[in-house]
Amino acid sequence: MNDYYVVIPNYFLDGEVTKDELYIYYIIQRFKSCVDYKVIISSMLLADYIKHYFNFKFRKQRSKNANKVAEILKSLKNKNIISIDSFGAEEILFDTVIEIKLNKLDTRKGYEKIYYSVFDLADDPGEFMILCIIYRYQKISSRINYSYLARKTGVNYKVVSRVMQKMINEGEITRVQGRRYYDDNGELVIEKNRYYVNVF
């Protein structure tokens, strides 16, 4: 596992941001200048960058994909996660050149160092958020289930189940089955599974 990572506040993984917002935020963090924490770019160029380097797009059509990225950026701005200077432009369109500045975030309730190698396992924003949550919980050996992942990510349960099985089959995630046993009252207890992100 390489040493490069992005700090993600725990509240990001508790429903305060969407999977798409988390994905874009992480990419901006990777893309930013190491000197001043600013990125000057248009939504179109950012969308093209994501498509080229990470092989992902939110929409098939280029302009619609760029518009989706612009919507996500505006949402991150409204949540005070980033600041945007549009250089006098009244509206942020897909071709509007903007300066993105990453705001200082509250990490008093904890944070995760999400390494680039974790991000690089993901094919899309839903997979990335699932990986982040699993990575968070594996550190404390906590057990989670698909219903929890679906609730936290906003991804349909059936999609979570399919995505998890795919990542398990591809060796990106290891599943440790929870025990089945009878308690002192003779009731069957079925423990939740544990999951681990396989990064090296």
Image (spheres, rainbow, N blue to C red):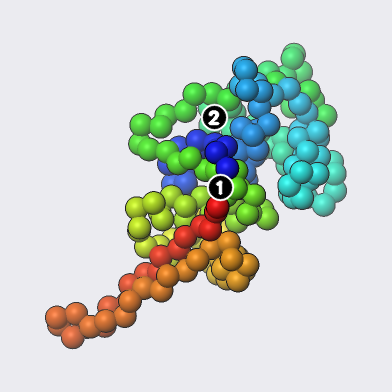
| Front disc: 2 or 1 | 1
Residue 1, which numbered label? 1
Left or right of 166? Residue 53 is right
Q: Position of residue 79 (x, y in %)?
A: 53, 31
Q: Position of residue 28 (x, y in %)?
A: 65, 33
Query: Vertically, is 29 above or below 157?
Result: above
Residue annotated with mark 2: 81
User: 31 or 71, which lies in front?
Assistant: 31
* Residue found 50% across the figure and 60% down from its top: 150
Left or right of 156? Residue 139 is left
Left or right of 115? Residue 14 is left
Going by the numbered disc 1, the residue's amino acid type is Met
Going by the numbered disc 2, the residue's amino acid type is Ile
Query: Vertically, is 191 above or below 172?
Result: below
Q: Residue furthest top?
A: 88
User: 133 or 118, which lies in front?
Assistant: 118
Residue 142, which numbered label? none
Residue 10 visible (yes or no):
yes
Instruction: Indicate the secondary structure of the residue bearing disc 1.
Output: loop
Residue 75 visible (yes or no):
no
